[in-house]
Image: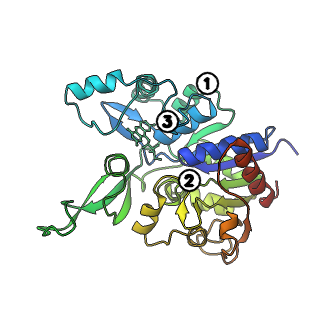
Amino acid sequence: MGCVRVVVVAGGIGGARFLRGVRAAIPDAEVTALVNTGDDLTVHGMRVCPDLDTVMYTLGDGIDRARGWGRDGESWRVKDELAAYGADPAWFGLGDLDLATHLIRTRMLDAGYPLSAVTEALCARWRPGVRLLPMSDDRVETHVLVDAEPGPADAPRTGGGRRAIHFQEWWVRHRATLPAYGFVQVGLEAAKPAAGVLDALATADAILLAPSNPVVSIGTVLAVPGIRDAVRAAPGQVVGLSPIVAGAPVRGMADACLTAIGVATTAEAVGRRYGSRAWADGVLDGWLVDTADAAARVPGVRVEAVPLLMTDEAATTAMARAALTLAGV
Ligand code: FO1
């Protein structure tokens, strides 16, 4: 048998850290990261792909480890100049070094290159050691349904009703504190899996769902027409890792996202949301939970409990190894 092929479905910061563990756990394998692009947005005329960039910078050792996103050694002079002009949005900060990535990406997209080709070109510099694939070369943007006029909870609701704001505005400007009534992936129906995605899934010896946001990251990737079916039909085992430990997200605000879709913030509820591959629409064969959640049960899915806190690279490598073992690789 040739070298082992592993596909990791991932979002941003948690997914990037997990991918470092996968790369260390199985260094001779061909690892493909299938990355969420629903967080992408256009700011100051440039296309920004937060999850692709977070994975690329993390694996390419260019990430700011404290922030988890953006470049190390970053400066914010252009951001401050834009603010001095009163240029919106002021709430989404682009660092001076990070700007180079968005300028290159925007120029290539404008020249007609698909996002997968742009990502490959950027990775020629960063050399992440895994293949990065956007979930789609088509634009898909996650928007969040919130109250039309957010204000004090007891404020009289005038017309009531709801409006959709871009995920990044909800996440960064409002820190996910606005009650969310659901998510809309704009452009999803017309989106196709990016070049190479279906082939990677069809030839994978194992597919791992990284401990990323199960709603707006993993959920968005699986919602691209054709991807969920390709995962369900894949010859390799499918193993997910819970992003929820002891009832709380390991990082980020996945709990606000789960609440918005009526799913409890528990390892068991998220596993059941993904569902068993033996059942309608389910995708899982195995579900890795933290030792704190060892009582979790997911019908039709093998559940195993191991430490899931990515405290350092050794811990992350160990959990990646556990996931690969559960996937039979
Ligand atoms: N997160 C913030 O909290 N504030 C920001 O100003 C911000 C800017 C930003 C720019 C580029 C980028 O790749 C990521 C950025 N992020 C910022 C993080 C981003 O919102 C998240 O990484 C994901 O979109 C959520 O997983």
Q: CA distance from mark 3 to mark 1?
A: 14 Å
Q: Nearer the viewer, residue 261 or 316?
A: 316
Amino acid type at circle 1 is Ala
Quadrant in the picture for residue 61 = top right
Q: Nearer the viewer, residue 189 or 304?
A: 304
Could you tell which of marks 2 and 3 lies nearer the N-terminus? Answer: 3
Check disc 1: other Cα within 10 Å, few if <14, some if 14-19, many if 20+. Answer: few
Point out the tag, 2 or 1, that comes first from the N-terminus.
1
Residue situated furthest right in the rendering: 1
Is residue 69 shown to the viewer in this render? Answer: yes
Q: Position of residue 169 (x, y in %)?
A: 32, 47
Q: Amino acid at mark 2?
A: Ser
Render colour scheme: rainbow
Q: Is residue 129 above or below residue 252?
A: above
Find residue 301 and report its horizontal and vertical position in percent: 70, 72
Cβ of mark 2 under 8 Å from ligand 1: the answer is yes
Q: Is residue 215 above or below residue 298?
A: above
| Residue type at numbered disc 3 | Leu
Residue 227 pos. (x, y %): 57, 56
Q: Is residue 206 left or right of residue 98?
A: right
Density class for disc 2 (Cα within 10 Å; few <14, some 14-19, many ≥20) is many
Which residue was labeled with disc 1? 124
Q: Residue at x 61, y 72 (%)?
A: 268
**What residue sits right under mark 2 in the picture?**
212
Reading the image, the residue beneath label 3 is 115
Count of residue discs? 3
Q: CA distance from mark 2 to mark 1?
A: 25 Å
State left or right for residue 256 relative to residue 296.
left
Q: Quadrant of ligand 1?
A: top left
